Image: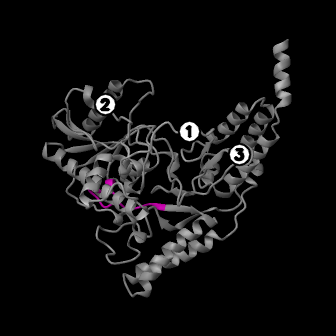
Amino acid sequence: MLQAVCVLFAAAAFDARPWLDDLRQLTSEISAHYANLDWAVEHRRMDLPKLREDTEARLRAATSEQEARAALQRFVDVFGDGHLTIEWPKPEAPSATPPASSLCARLGYRRPSSPGIDFSQVAGFTPLGAEPFPHGLLRLGRRTVGVLRIALFSEHSSPEVCEDILREMRLDTSAPCDSTCADSIDLASANRLTAEIDRRARELRTRGATTILVDITRNGGGSNWVEAPPRALSRVPLSEPRLAFLRHPHWTPQLEQKLKDVETDLQAGRGPRATLEEAAARLRRGISATREPCDRSGVWVTGKLGCAMLVSDVLFTDGLVAHAAPGAFAGLASRTTLFHPLLYAYTESADRLPLYVIVDRHTWSAAEYFAAILQDNRAAVVAGELTGGAGCGYTDGGIPAVLTNSGAKVRLPDCVRLRRDGSDEVAGVTPDLLVPWAEWESPFTKADKLVRALVREQAKLRKPGKQE
């Protein structure tokens, strides 16, 4: 009896009104600048009015801050978007760790700890090398497959490479390193890592591999450097899909800077003039679109979007053209604005091995881009399971949103990577070859299932009468 009275007292004492205000602010933020809202309503057919009503009911029934937090967390989780997150404030605690002494450590260089497929227990696997990209040879019948592990698509993933770069650049590691200094180190590290991927792929071929299997399971994403590795491995030039952005002031200065780069070349008489003029026209149209109002707040009552928030006919994922060969647009101020992968050193070649890309439910964000662009260009067979579903994330730091009552920080993606078929990459990358993994399986079982699936796939592709 006493316990019941205490519960009733706690329920009466807890004031849900500030949390309901947080929910109203959260729904307002989502309707104003959540890039994947169209996908959620039009393709997933999410009932947003019901989701709002259910969450309101949970908040009103909450008897504690923990229960109120859980209600808002559930609200966000229902969207199933790896880039839609809510971060709860934590009390500040004094740091127990001393500041990093290494410049590379201070710049954020850390080796990723996420393991990939464990082929070491599989018969017929021979390891050839470790970090930064573990690789080896796997026998499948009479075929030899080269295995290449990429744990993270970030130039910060190899402290050892960073240290080598510092020695070559003869930098004073005790001196301050501003943004220009950090960018130069990052670019040098990115190009070194790209060269390492290319070198290991060639080594696998020299040692008898007829196919390369790129393992990006448990790869959480990374940085823009992800633009280079698929191009360093693909046998075909990779064409970029469209990038959709929000009709929102957040995008105005980004597009204005791109236009400034293009106009610099036009005013200087540099070419190709037709390409630059067409790009400038699209950018002006895009800038105008970012200033157009679009009120979608009614979606939480009617379930209807009301107006189109996304602009999808201005940008490609990596610039203003779908493809440019290495070395293109030399001497242009807008070189990387037109095609951002040109920032990195890589080559294109038809003389490369066929690719398999292995993904799982823990493959996210930039890693999904890697799998998607190769799949959409028919440059690789993707195997494994449906990826996590994060797609495009945040540009230029994203659009900040902090809930007034709880102080929770909400992160909302402001862009959409569109697949070749027009779908939103937030839906995840569906493999061409599904492998029925379960979360509880041992590393050996997971590797064994993958190998068996690859063997069956090879058997289907085998010519009649040919023996393995």
Q: Nearer the viewer, residue 223 or 326?
A: 223
User: Is 255 placed above or below 124 here?
Assistant: below
Q: Earlier in the sequence, mark 1 or mark 2?
A: 1
Q: Are marks 2 and 3 in contact (CB under 8 Å)?
A: no
Mark 1: which amino acid? Pro
Magenta stretch, main secondary structure class: loop
Residues marked 3 and 1 touching at CB (< 8 Å): no
Between the C-alphas of marks 1 and 2, the distance is 38 Å
Q: What residue sits right under mark 3 in the picture? A: 48
How far apart are the alpha carbons under marks 2 and 3?
42 Å
- For the question of whether residue 213 can be seen, the reply is yes
Residue drawn where x is 53% and y is 55% of the image: 394
Magenta stretch contains residue 106: no
Q: In the rendered image, which quarter contains the C terminus?
A: top left
For image coordinates 69% across by 45% down, the residue present is: 407
Query: Disc 3 and disc 1: Cα gap in Å?
Result: 41 Å
Q: Which amino acid is tagged 2?
A: Asp
Q: Secondary structure at mark 3?
A: helix
Specify few, some or many for label 2: CA neighbours under 10 Å numbering under 14, 14-19, or 20 or more: some
Would you name the residue on which mark 2 appears? 118
Q: Position of residue 252 (x, y in %)?
A: 59, 70
Q: Which residues are magenta?
A: 228-242
Residue for badge 1 = 94
Circles 1 and 2: CB atoms closer than 8 Å? no
Check disc 1 and report its element: helix, strand or loop.
Answer: loop
Q: Label 1 crowding class (10 Å Cα cut-off): few <14, some 14-19, many 20+? A: few
